[in-house]
Image (spheres, rainbow, N blue to C red):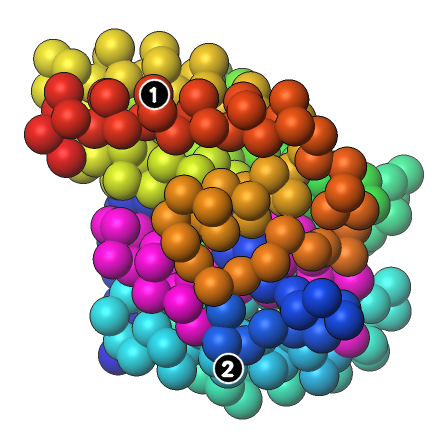
Amino acid sequence: MAYNEFPGGAWPVMLTPFTADNKVDYEGLKALTSWYIDNGCSGLFSDCQSSEMFFLNLQERVNIARTVIETAAGRVPVIVSGHISDTLEGQVEELQQIAALKPDALIFITNRFAKENESDEVWRKNCEYVMSKLPDDIPLGAYECPYPYKRLISLENLKWCADTGRFHFLKDTCCDLELLKQRANAVRNTKLKIYNANTTTLLESIRGGCAGFCGVMASFQMKLYAWLCDHIDDPKADKLQDLLTVTSLIERQYYPVNAKYYLQHYEKLPITTYTRTKDASGLTETFKDEVRQLKNLTELVSEKLGI
């Protein structure tokens, strides 16, 4: 399915399940993909930082993207990143292999096109070079990934991206409501839509012109984020926003192990809590109890909202 205009709503940054012997668990990934879809996601972001892309080899990144695209089977759009090389030539190789899978968009990592001390002009030049090596008909996007450093895209470069006509998606991590509104205004009436990764500013950012959510908490509260994005004018939306802001603090606890524990233990997905970024044994009993209480609160709110 080709998406000329990506839907608003909640887009999870996908986790990568691993087996106990540190291999990608593709059967678990299929189950996880279906869980996101069944719980109301508008689209899926594969091979991102939450997927542990910097700890995956290229073949794993390609196979993960292929598995998600095939499992989604056109039910929702699938966007994919996975370019982690420091060299432009390496990034082109990575992106060309992923482009061959025909995802609904290729997502550029904003810190890959310029070093921290390099200018917007360098960034545009390198972005343009990589674009020239990719198929003209594949939609593009950008992601302000915090690792290895966060490069926020300038308004000038954002407008440039929109004016190319090729960019459809920005995963925004600025966490600044006024800047989010400025960005939404800058790309108004273009194909480029902005998806906020930050819970605290989410509701007001959508009211201010952003398209939806693309963040970590969709792996815990998928239904609630989908509901909020679709009901921004509902009188209950503001109270739900308040709750989600507080519960989103669990991101800072022991992610992504805690998210995998939640999905395994409470959503009964056939996945482990193993990751390549953190030792699963670091999820203490207190942390687990906090996840349990998050689940109970989520169920209570879902019942109240009729979700």
> Toward the viewer: 231 or 273?
273
Q: Is residue 83 magenta?
A: no
Name the residue located 42 percent from the left edge and 77 percent from the top edge.
69
**Residue 182 visible in the shown view:** no
- Between marks 2 and 1, how big is the CA–CA gap? 35 Å
Query: Picture coordinates of residue 29 (x, y %)?
Result: 50, 69
Q: Nearer the viewer, mark 2 or mark 1?
A: 1
Residue range in magenta is 30-57
Q: Residue at x 76, y 71 (%)?
A: 21
**Callout 2: helix, strand or loop?**
helix
Image quarter where the C terminus lies is: top left
Identity, as a three-letter code, of the amino acid under mark 2? Arg
39 falls in the magenta region: yes
Specify few, some or many for label 2: CA neighbours under 10 Å numbering under 14, 14-19, or 20 or more. Answer: some
Q: How many numbered marks does the figure carry?
A: 2
Quadrant location of the N terminus? bottom left
Mark 1 secondary-structure assignment: helix
Residue 76, position as x, y percentages in the image = 28, 65
Residue 199 in the image: state x and y as whole percent. 45, 25
Residue 221 showing in the rendered view: yes
Report which residue position mark 2 lands on: 66
Rendered location of residue 5, percent (x, y) = 26, 60
Is 58 above or below relative to 162? below
Residue at screen point 60% across, 58% down: 272
Kind of residue at badge 1: Leu
* Image quadrant in which you'd find residue 62: bottom right
According to the picture, the residue beneath numbered tag 1 turns out to be 297
Between 135 and 10, which is closer to the camera in this rendering?
10
Q: Quadrant of residue 211?
A: top left
